[in-house]
Image: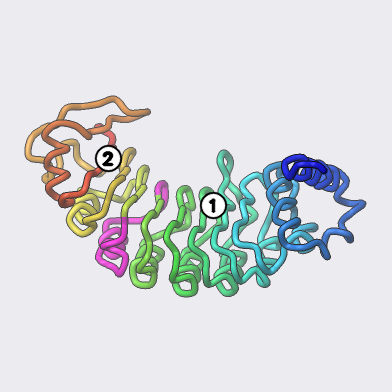
Amino acid sequence: MPSSRRVSQLLDLCLWCCMKNISRYITDIKPLPPNIKDRLIKIMSTQGQITDSNISEILHPEVQTLDLRSCDISDTALLHLCNCRKLKKLNISSSKENRISITSKGIKAVASSCSYLHEASLKRCCNLTDEGVLALAVNCRLLKIIDLGGCLGITDVSLHALGENCPFLQCVDFSATQVSDDGVVALVNGSCAKKLEEIHMGHCVNLTDEAVEAVLTCCPQIRILLFHGCPLITACPPWFLTPPTLVQCGTGISRNRDHSREVLEQLVGPNKLKQVTWTVY
C-alpha cells in the first residue's frame, strides 16, 4: 500500500499537470473538493498561473489564504472574491514593478465581502487610493497587518481610518506614500495604539520629528520602526539626549545602539525595541 507521502506526491504531480493544461481541464476544476483546490491554488499562484479568466473556477467559499503576488491579475479577479467570505490573508503585492491594474474598485469589493480579513498586502498597488483603504478599515475591523508601501495615492485619510476602525492592527507599512505627521499622529492615537508593534514609514518626504516622537510616546508595544529616507526628520531629533553611535545599515544609517537605544527603550517602556533605522542627511 503506498505511503501517504507518495500519494501526496502523486496528487501534486496530477495537479501540476492540470495547471500546465489548464485550458483543457478548466471545466473539470470547479467541482473539485476544497482541500484539492487549496493545493491547486498554491501551485498555480506560485507559478503565476492564476488570471482574471480562470480565478472564478479555482476559488471556493472556504478559501482562507490567497497569495497572488506572482499573478497577473486586475480588479476583475478581485471581484470574484465575493464568495470567499472566510478569507483571512490576501497578498497582491508586487515585489518589483508597480501593479497598475489594481484600484480601489477591486479593494472595495474585497472589503465588502471579506470581513474576516486579517492581513492585506497591497505593496506597490500604485493606483490604490484612500477610498479603498477606507473601505478595508470600515469593513475589515479584524485587520492585524496591512502593507500599503509604495501606494502613491495614499494620504493621511487612510491612516485616520485605520486608527479609528482597526483596534487589532499590529503592523502597518505606509512607506513611500503621501502621509504627513497629522496622519501618523491620528494612527498612533487611535484604537490600535496599544497593539502596534511594527511601523514602516520610510521614504515619506512629508514626515518630521513629530511623527517619530508620536509613535515612540503612544505605542508601548512598538518593536520595529523604520523611517529611513525621510529628509525632514533631523539628524539629532529632540527624543535623543546625546548623539548615538552610528551603525551602517543598508543604504542609510541606522541609529540603534548605545545611549540612543537606552533612550528609545525608556520611551517605549520595559519591552525591547528590536530595530529602528533612519537616514542622516
Asked if residue 279 is positioned above or below residue 125 in the image, the reply reads above
164 vs 37, nearest the viewer: 37
Q: Which image quarter holds the C terminus?
A: top left
Say whether residue 219 is magenta: no
Q: Secondary structure at mark 1?
A: loop
Task: State which quadrant residue 194 falls in.
Answer: bottom left
Residue at 65%, 54% in the rendered image: 101
**How far separated are the C-alphas under marks 2 and 1?**
26 Å
Q: Secondary structure at mark 2?
A: strand
232 vs 158, nearest the viewer: 158
Residue located beneath label 1 in the image: 126
Query: Along the horizontal axis of the image, is 96 left or right of 40?
Result: left
Asked if residue 36 is positioned above or below residue 276 in the image, the reply reads below
Q: Magenta stretch?
A: 175-196
Residue at 74%, 57% in the rendered image: 37
Say whether residue 190 is magenta: yes
Residue at 38%, 54% in the rendered image: 171
239 vs 197, nearest the viewer: 197
186 vs 41, nearest the viewer: 41
Task: State which quadrant residue 108 falls in.
Answer: bottom right
Amino acid marked by disc 2 = Val
Judged by its main secondary structure, the magenta piece is: loop
* Res 276 label: 2
Query: Along the horizontal axis of the image, is 125 left or right of 25?
Result: left
Query: Along the horizontal axis of the image, is 237 left or right of 135?
Result: left
